[in-house]
Image (tube, rainbow, N blue to C red):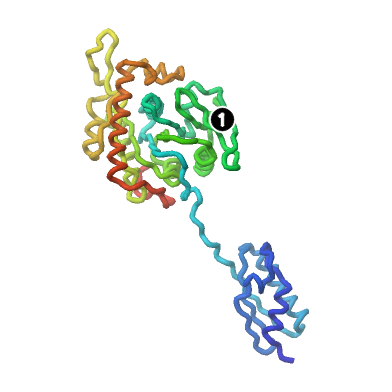
């Protein structure tokens, strides 16, 4: 008795690939059937890549054909895996509705006062009437909850568009989300890059930010996984790089600038801020002592053809204000308030030029930062 292909297909209609629901035939798992005398060759493709799934479907096909068609048939089954359609990372396709400008505050080196600049810039923007938020992306050393005197607060859960989201903590007119709200202050955060990136994505996309004119992102020092995760997750409008005047800090600041200027990243650098520029004693307020060198960041801005946004002096009051959770920019009509107000206005001026002359920044679709120094 000759064997016909339709007999084989009829037998295959009784089988289902592991986890796929429909029969092999209905689900188009059967790619080819060849009958040559007593020999039958069946080519099937399934989505489950495990060896166990492949062996199971191979055994079931051989058994079904012999039982339903003929025991004399020699059955060979070739099982391949369906290549899963590669979908783009959903994070890379998201935007934060209601947020107009996303500014990354970065530094190549730790300890240059990047978080202090972020906090006081946010307060200055708020005093100008803008709606402002801060995402504390320094997951290993969060500080915004301390600088805004909200260390004892916790983001509450709210319903938005049918989803449960975190409501940022707010103080001094600035909305804040920081990993500091969720970790024990006496324990170190010991996470690999993927874990830190996941936590950041939750603070970005599972947050009820509402309408903001500015979201400032306080990045950790250096040029690593967190930085790449941020530029892959969000279309950064522009970056501000903070440095102190000495050469060793400037060398690291150059790396921070280079990261944003990478061809595959291409985030506009709005300008350079020089922190701890000089020291003026209270008893000699007109004297300036350039402890860490003079005009280092200003010279760097000229070298990279970026704007010099301003300088902030080395003053004990800035440190004290940060320690007690009341940014010094909250003061009125002081030299320090004027310094932060001035650099914030300069940043806004550069942002207006950037938004007028350049297209919107796109999220980065790369997985490595080749050529960018760590």
169 or 197: nearer the viewer: 169
Does 175 appear above or below 77? Answer: above
**Which secondary structure lies at badge 1?**
loop
In the rendering, at what x and y percent does residue 275 appear?
A: 31, 26
Identified at 54% across, 25% down, the residue is 185
Identify which residue, 215 or 264, lies in the foreground: 215
State whether residue 184 is above or below residue 4: above
Q: Residue at x 28, y 34 (%)?
A: 349
Left or right: where does residue 39 sit relative to residue 299?
right
At which x and y percent is residue 8? 70, 81
Quarter-of-image position of residue 183? top right
Q: Nearer the viewer, residue 238 or 1?
A: 238
Q: Which residue appears at 32% of the width and 50% of the height?
A: 263
Q: Quadrant of residue 82?
A: bottom right
Considering depth in this image, is 207 or 317 the residue closer to the camera?
A: 207
Residue denoted by label 1: 155
Location of residue 193 with respect to 17 vertically, above or below: above
Within the image, what quadrant is residue 147 found in? top left
Q: Looking at the image, can residue 191 be seen?
A: no
Other residues around mark 1 within 10 Å, as few (<14) / some (14–19) / many (≥20)? some
Q: How many marks?
A: 1
Q: Is the N terminus in the top left, top right, bottom left or bottom right quadrant?
A: bottom right
What percent of the width, then of the height, locates residue 65?
Answer: 73, 79
Residue drawn at (66%, 64%) of the image:
20
The answer to whether residue 310 is visible is yes
């Amino acid at each position: 008795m000759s064997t016909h292909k339709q007999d084989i297909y009829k037998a295959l209609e009784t089988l289902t690939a592991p986890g796929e629901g429909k029969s092999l035939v209905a689900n188009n798992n059967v790619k080819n059937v060849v009958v040559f005398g007593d020999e039958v060759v069946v080519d099937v493709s399934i989505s489950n890549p495990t060896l166990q799934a492949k062996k199971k479907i191979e055994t079931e096909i051989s058994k079904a054909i012999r039982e339903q068609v003929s025991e004399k048939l020699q059955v060979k089954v070739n099982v391949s895996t369906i290549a899963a359609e590669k979908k783009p990372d959903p994070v890379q396709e998201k935007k934060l509705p209601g947020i107009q400008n996303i500014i990354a505050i970065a530094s190549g080196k730790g300890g240059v006062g990047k978080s202090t600049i972020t906090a006081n810039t946010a307060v200055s923007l708020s005093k100008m009437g803008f709606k402002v938020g801060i995402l504390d992306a320094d997951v290993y050393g969060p500080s915004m909850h301390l600088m805004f005197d909200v260390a004892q607060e916790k983001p509450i859960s709210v319903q938005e568009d049918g989803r449960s989201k975190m409501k940022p903590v707010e103080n001094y007119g600035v909305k804040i989300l920081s990993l500091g709200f969720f970790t024990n202050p006496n324990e170190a955060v010991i996470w690999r890059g993927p874990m830190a990136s996941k936590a950041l994505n939750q603070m970005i996309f599972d947050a009820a930010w509402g309408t903001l004119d500015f979201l400032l992102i306080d990045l950790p020092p250096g040029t690593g996984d967190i930085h790449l995760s941020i530029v892959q997750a969000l279309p950064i409008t522009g970056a501000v790089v903070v440095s102190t005047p000495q050469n060793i800090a400037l060398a690291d600041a150059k790396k921070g600038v280079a990261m944003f200027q990478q061809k595959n990243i291409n985030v506009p650098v709005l300008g350079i801020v020089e922190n701890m520029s000089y020291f003026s004693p209270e008893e000699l307020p007109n004297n300036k002592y350039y402890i860490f060198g003079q005009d280092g960041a200003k010279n760097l801005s000229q070298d990279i053809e970026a704007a010099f946004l301003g300088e902030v002096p080395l003053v004990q009051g800035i440190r004290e204000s940060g320690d007690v959770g009341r940014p010094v920019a909250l003061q009125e009509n002081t030299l320090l308030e004027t310094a932060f107000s001035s650099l914030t206005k300069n940043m806004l001026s550069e942002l207006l030029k950037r938004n007028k002359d350049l297209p919107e920044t796109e999220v980065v679709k790369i997985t490595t930062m080749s050529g960018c120094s760590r």
